[in-house]
Amino acid sequence: MRLTEAAAGHGWRDHRDLLGPARDLTFAEVERSGLRGRGGFWTPTAARLRAVRRCHTVVVNGMEGDPLSAKDTWLLRHAPHLVVDGAVAAARLLGAREVVVAVPVGGDGPSLTEALAGRDGSQDPPVRVAEGPAAYLAGEDTALVARLRGGPAGSGAFLPSDDGWYVANAETCAHLALIARHGATWFRGQGTAAAPGTMLVTLGGSVPRPGVVEVPVGTPLARLAHPAGPVLVGGHRGRWLTGEAARNVNLDPDVMPVDTACVTVLPVGASVLERTREMTEWLAAEGAGAVVSRLVASALTVAAKEQARGFAEPFAFPDLSFGAAA
């Protein structure tokens, strides 16, 4: 049973009836599973767990600041108990006293709080929901923990793990919950040798069925969409590809490293540069203008290729560098 099959909704009893109880995790089991964090950097989860000093709090990062991504929102909406099961398993492993589920203000915080209130977890650490600003950088680990500690989002330079905080993406926690039930060998039954398991991908734009899908790591993009127009892989920190190039890409972090597992397809003839201008303006307004270099460089390359193939109107290269100055 994978993530989408384990989506039992908000009901605690339905969740337990579908999945049954989870075993305690061990460092060795997590290490054998090869699970890597699904929050963007694909860091080995076992290494992240071992790095925490005197852990007191496990944080589920459900902030999902990139508007092109919806996977964590989907998980917390359809499988909240699965996510929390994984966080609780991590907390028990690390000896943490509390689990915090961080979500953006205006999202599913109230319904999530109501759902979690029905959990029968008398032997587990307490779980609470914390809402934060719906901003692009608010989900960065350091900014998130700084706010949970009571300071401004950008206060001080520190490593959360050095201060007793273990922060994990919502999808990472959900995978931990399934590993606790089915084991490392089961988890490695899909994916690649270096990045086992499945991944959630947000499909958007000019595709037949937009939404969140679950696929084994390493799946060819062409199995999800057969784009003719330009494709953005990785959201606002991602890169543009021509449709032809995208059809030959595998969704593998070691082949196509991107921060966000989302694929956005533009129609044939759509302006990559105009879409990129909108994105860089948004990033600059969010205080994240410094991350646009790869996005802009790939946009210019794809736009030139599209024009050369007659798929776009002639254009003069505009100045897209303004976002980087923010």
Image (tube, grey):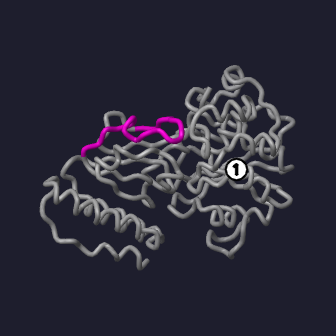
Residue denoted by label 1: 45
Give the left or right position of residue 242, taking residue 37 as reference: left
Residue 216: percent from left, percent from top: 53, 36
Q: Amino acid at mark 1?
A: Thr
235 in relation to 198, above or below: below
Which residue corresponds to the image point at 80% horizontal and 39% vertical from the top-left? Answer: 25
Which residue in the rendered view is the most extreme toward the top? 17
Residue 191: percent from left, percent from top: 57, 38
Image quadrant in which the C terminus is located: bottom left
Characterize the local packing of mark 1: few (<14), some (14-19) or many (20 or more) Cα atoms within 10 angstroms: many
* Most foreground residue, 58 or 300: 300
Which residue corresponds to the image point at 50% horizontal and 41% vertical from the top-left? Answer: 218
Residue 181: percent from left, percent from top: 74, 30
Residue 249: percent from left, percent from top: 40, 46
The image quarter containing residue 225 is: top left
288 in relation to 88, above or below: below
88 in relation to 298, above or below: above
The image quarter containing residue 7 is: top right
Q: SS at mark 1?
A: helix
126 in relation to 273, above or below: above
Magenta range is: 211-228
Which residue corresponds to the image point at 35% horizontal and 76% vertical from the top-left? Answer: 322
* Most foreground residue, 88 or 216: 216
Give the left or right position of residue 24, taking residue 36 as reference: right
